[in-house]
Each structure stands twice: as C-alpha cells, then as structure tokens.
Amino acid sequence: MAAAAAGTPADAGAPAVALVVRALAFATLRHTDQRRKGSRAQPYVNHLAEVALLVSEATAGADAALVAAALLHDVVEDQEVTPAEIAATFGADVAGLVMEVTDDKALDAAERKRRQVAHAPHLSARAKVLKLADKTANLRSLAQDPPLDWGIGRMRAYVEWSRAVAAGLRGRAPALEAAFDAAADEAISAIDARMAAPT
C-alpha cells in the first residue's frame, strides 16, 4: 500500500467518509422494511443511494454533509425520525438540509405538492441540489418501474409536477439539471410506450 503524501495524515479523509457511512448505516436500518412501489419492490435504500450518488457527482464529492443528507432525506417523512435526533447524530448542518427538503405530512398531498413548487426557488443552494437529485431519481424510477397502482394520467401529472418543482431549482448544478431533463424525457417516452402497448 502506498504511503500517504508528505504532510498529509493517512486518515485525512476519514471524517467525511465516516459521516457518509454512518448516514448510510442509519438510513439502511431505519428503512429496512420499506420498499419502492413498483413491481420489483426494490429496497428503498436503493433510491437513497442513487440520490446520494447524484449529489456526490454534482458536488464533485466535496460536500460530505450534503451526501449524508441525501441518504437521510426521507427519514423524517417516512420513518418518524425527529430533527433533533438527526442533529444529535449527524450535526446541525445535516439536520438543516434534511428539514429543508422534508414535507409536512400533516398537510394533504395536494397542498404538499403545491408547497414544493412554491418553496423550491427559496431553498438554499445546497438543498436545491438535493431536491433536484431526488426528483431525478424518482423520474428514473417512474420510467423503469412505476408504482403498480398508478395509471397513465397520474404518471404524466407526476412528470409535469416534477418539472414545475425543478424550474425553481435551476442555476446550481448544470450537469444534474441535464440529468433531470433526460429523466423527465425518458419518463414521458416510457409512458407513451405503455399507452401504445396492447392491453
């Protein structure tokens, strides 16, 4: 094994790596029994890993706290983890990022969707990257393995709503924006193909 460069501790990257791995372990444990809604019923953690990868690529791996937040972005909504628990375990920065992209589940679905569109332009720059990564991953999933109980109309509406949210997230990560646009186009093409397929 090569020695560390002169003046560089061998574990210089350990704190950032440790933060991300701890977030992955935490998310995996909390989402253990959760599955995606498509026919493949993929483990939910697959989605979290994809969002984290997109965030890591968009930030050139330079923002470990944001990657950790990507792994944790659904634990409050889906697993009843509290913001205080995230802050105590991962720090205030990670907790703040998670809460920026967390919906208020006390509201009905239509209002939550409306608020996502309205609030998107006002998110912090880092939260915009996280939110856009989440939307990109969700659209890829919609194209490849949509929820079993979603009809064509609902799928189309989801793509258009996602585009409306994304409109307020632009200007931070051009490559991620391009990936989102490609995912939206792919989703529409997949929906069109399903419409054309014989029943």
Image: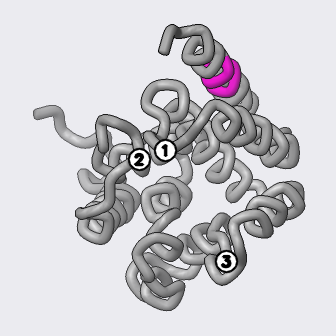
Of the two numbered discs 3 and 2 on the same chain, state the one appearing first in sequence. 2
Residues tagged 2 and 1 counted as in contact (Cβ below 8 A)? yes
Instruction: Give 148 or 188, whichever is nearer the viewer.
Output: 148
Quarter of image, res 6: top left
Query: Which three-letter amino acid code belongs to the residue tagged 2?
Result: Lys
Q: Which residues are magenta?
A: 183-188
Residue under numbered circle 2: 37
Furthest residue toward left: 1
The answer to whether residue 60 shows anywhere in this view is no
Reading the image, the residue beneath label 3 is 104
On the image, the x and y values in percent for residue 144 come to 46, 25
Residue 169's spot in the image, x, y percent? 80, 46
Q: Which residue position is annotated with label 1?
A: 149
| Amino acid at the residue labelled 3 | Asp
Q: Which mark is residue 54?
A: none
Q: Residue at x 38, y 48 (%)?
A: 36
Our reading of the magenta stretch's main secondary structure is helix
